[in-house]
Image: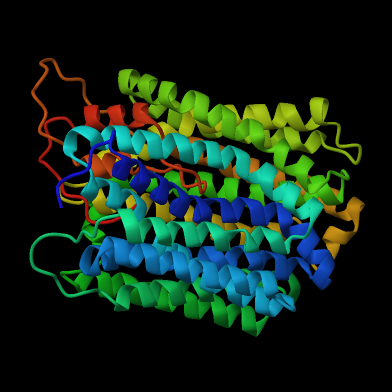
Amino acid sequence: MPALTYASGKGRWVIAGTVLGSGIAALDATVVGIALPAIGRDFHSTVVSMQWVVDGYTLTLAGLLLLGGALGDRYGRRKLFMTGAVWFALASLGCGLAPNEVFLIGSRVLQGVGAALLTPGSLAILQASFAPDDRAKAVGAWSGLGGVATAVGPFLGGWLITAVSWRLVFFINLPVAAAVVAIAVRHIPESRAPGPRPPLDKTGPALISLALAGITYGLIAASDSGWSSPLVLGSLAAGAVVLAAFCVTEARNPHALLPLAVFGSRQFAAANAVTFVVYGALGGALFLVPIVLQEVCGYSPVEAGVALLPVTVIMLALSARSAGLAARIGPRLQMTAGPLVIAAGMALFTRLDRSGDYLTQVLPAMLVFGFGLAINVAPLTATALSAAPAGHSGVASAVNNDVARVASLIAVAVLPGLAGITGEAYLHPAALLRGFHTAVLIAAAVAAAGGVLAAATIRNPARRRERAKPAPPDEHALTSMSCALDAPPLRSGTVRYARQVAAGGAARRREDGP
């Protein structure tokens, strides 16, 4: 089929379909976080069960994300996009109908599989469908509309929980998924990666998923059973062994989904190490904030959703400017200062008491926290991409996104137990508040450590005395960078920064989704 143009009706439908498809997967994590207290009350759940409601989804999404992109390239991006949408909808139906917490957790695990099939396809479809001159406009529209959805999502989710039930948070995915499939059938063209099909790496995704499952189970179980429990030690040891087997397998496989050679760049390895540390702190803190606002401070789900809104607004408003600054001065300063500001925002949450006054206690912490994210995220993501060895820029974006998800997975598993939030502690406001204060201080220390790590390991690119004509970069890889907070890719400033850093490099072909 001829390439689509941005101004065409068919092109607008393709953008709408990809926005809806990526949006339901991205918003689900945020909205479910707000729904956790209501879920816990309905099922009389412990903290461990609430951790698994979040981590069950993240586990399969992180473990299978690279595979989802490869399957789309191999068998058809539209086909996998539609399959992911249907799978996600059916799993959402299971979540909404769940009679108990075990069924809900199992459905969340399946929902993560659907998201892993659905998520990589959106930008890959835009890249393959639009004419080169219109791709930037299409991705810009996708990013902007996704940003609006990210901002509205927590408020809408909170309203659904308050007005009807937490189950509606999952049921609402069904008509959206139906719309995605209808648009895809009628308007989205099929596309595949050109050239011969290399053997598909099936062992790698299976091993990393099993490794993450073992490690996550051990970390969550440790909060109740203790670190000396044979079950805990056995799970952690099994996870570590399988993780080592994954690394050996991927190193020996010439067609590995995760070529370990990508970590041969010191800058790339350092950027991902900083990503793991900082996003671990973020994931742990953001898991607890909505719960504490509702269970301790008496916020309604709507009020808890609105309380998080300043972070999204600041990110949308300042990410492009942050990227532009990093392009001028290099990423090191912002990647050092950003986590320190994030840590300060987390530390401000220790001022929270049972009154939960928004203007004096919650808003200052959210503002500082949001400014820290805006300072840090754009340079961090762009550095991870631009530092990748030649030929691996496509997989670099997916790896950085996956590293952030794994960090959040681990943090949600371990932080509540370290802070003493175990059993049914979330039902006791005083105990929960004490644990929350401890948790945010731990998260702040981890975030600050990320800033120190960046200062020690990140290097600014050398300034060029002469402006060389750059080779055309991989536009799809550059525009698919995500802040990994289950939000849409960052705006064009980040893309410009990555292009400047990558100027003069060889043209690179995108092989995976975001």
Place of residue 110 in the rendered image (x, y in percent of width and height, measured from the top left): 52, 73
Q: 192 or 498: which is nearer to us?
A: 192
Q: 158 or 2: which is nearer to us?
A: 2
**Residue appearing at x 84%, y 43% in the figure:** 299
The total of numbered circles placed on residues is: 0
Residue 431, image quadrant: bottom right
Q: Is residue 438 left or right of residue 380?
A: right
Place of residue 260 in the rendered image (x, y in percent of width and height, measured from the top left): 25, 61
**Residue appearing at x 65%, y 67% in the figure:** 53
Q: 501 or 104: which is nearer to us?
A: 104
**Residue appearing at x 64%, y 30% in the figure:** 310
Residue 309, image quadrant: top right
Q: Is residue 418 left or right of residue 116?
A: right
Q: Is residue 59 left or right of residue 459?
A: right
**Residue appearing at x 32%, y 48% in the figure:** 123
Place of residue 167 in the rendered image (x, y in percent of width and height, measured from the top left): 71, 64
Outermost top residue: 465
**Observer able to see residue 341:** no
Look at the picture and state if 417 lies above or below 384: below
Place of residue 66 in the rendered image (x, y in percent of width and height, measured from the top left): 33, 63
Look at the picture and state if 445 lies above or below 311: below
Colour logic: rainbow
**Observer able to see residue 58:** yes
